[in-house]
């Protein structure tokens, strides 16, 4: 499965998503981003914005941001997978 999570160390929203992915047993890769928004060019390239967390599910063609949306996706789609 090709799942990537763009996250910032110490970000509570990112930590919630990490925890949900771990609890669901989902294999994923974390791309750690810079603290400065202006330095998050990779996040902007893949998602169109610079805030995190951002989840990329290459297998399903899904790119999403906002931790609440990602948590619903993990619970409803990735947990069932």
Image: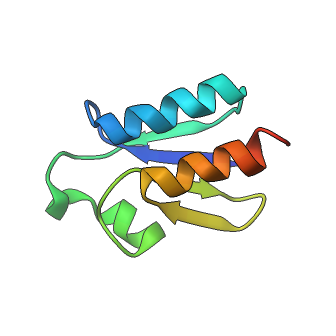
Instruction: Tell me what residue is drawn at x 52 percent, y 27 percent.
Output: 19
**Toward the viewer: 34 or 53?**
53
Say whether residue 72 is left or right of residue 58: left
Relative height, residue 19 to residue 2 (above, below):
above
Instruction: Tell me what residue is drawn at x 55 percent, y 52 percent.
Output: 70
Measured as percent of width and height from the top left, residue 56 is found at 59, 57
**Toward the viewer: 2 or 22?**
22
Say whether residue 49 is left or right of residue 56: left
**Toward the viewer: 44 or 26?**
26
Instruction: Tell me what residue is drawn at x 40 percent, y 50 percent.
Output: 53
What colouring style does the render use? rainbow
Picture quarter containing residue 23? top right
> Residue most toward the right?
81
Relative height, residue 65 to residue 14 (above, below):
below
Relative height, residue 9 to residue 34 (above, below):
above
Say whether residue 2 is left or right of residue 8: right
- Tell me the quadrant of the picture where the N terminus can be found: top right
Picture quarter containing residue 8? top left
Measured as percent of width and height from the top left, residue 64 is found at 53, 63
Q: How many marks?
A: 0
- Tell me the quadrant of the picture where the C terminus can be found: top right
Instruction: Tell me what residue is drawn at x 36 percent, y 41 percent.
Output: 13
Measured as percent of width and height from the top left, residue 36 is found at 14, 53
Say whether residue 79 is left or right of residue 29: right
Measured as percent of width and height from the top left, residue 5 is found at 51, 45
């Amino acid at each position: 499965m090709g799942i990537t999570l763009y996250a910032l160390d110490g970000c509570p929203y990112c930590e919630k998503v990490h925890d949900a992915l771990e609890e669901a047993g989902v294999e994923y890769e974390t791309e750690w981003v810079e603290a400065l928004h202006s330095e998050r060019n990779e996040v902007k390239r893949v998602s169109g914005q610079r805030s995190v967390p951002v989840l990329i599910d290459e297998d399903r063609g899904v790119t999403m941001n906002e931790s609440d949306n990602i948590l619903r996706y993990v619970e409803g789609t990735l947990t069932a997978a």
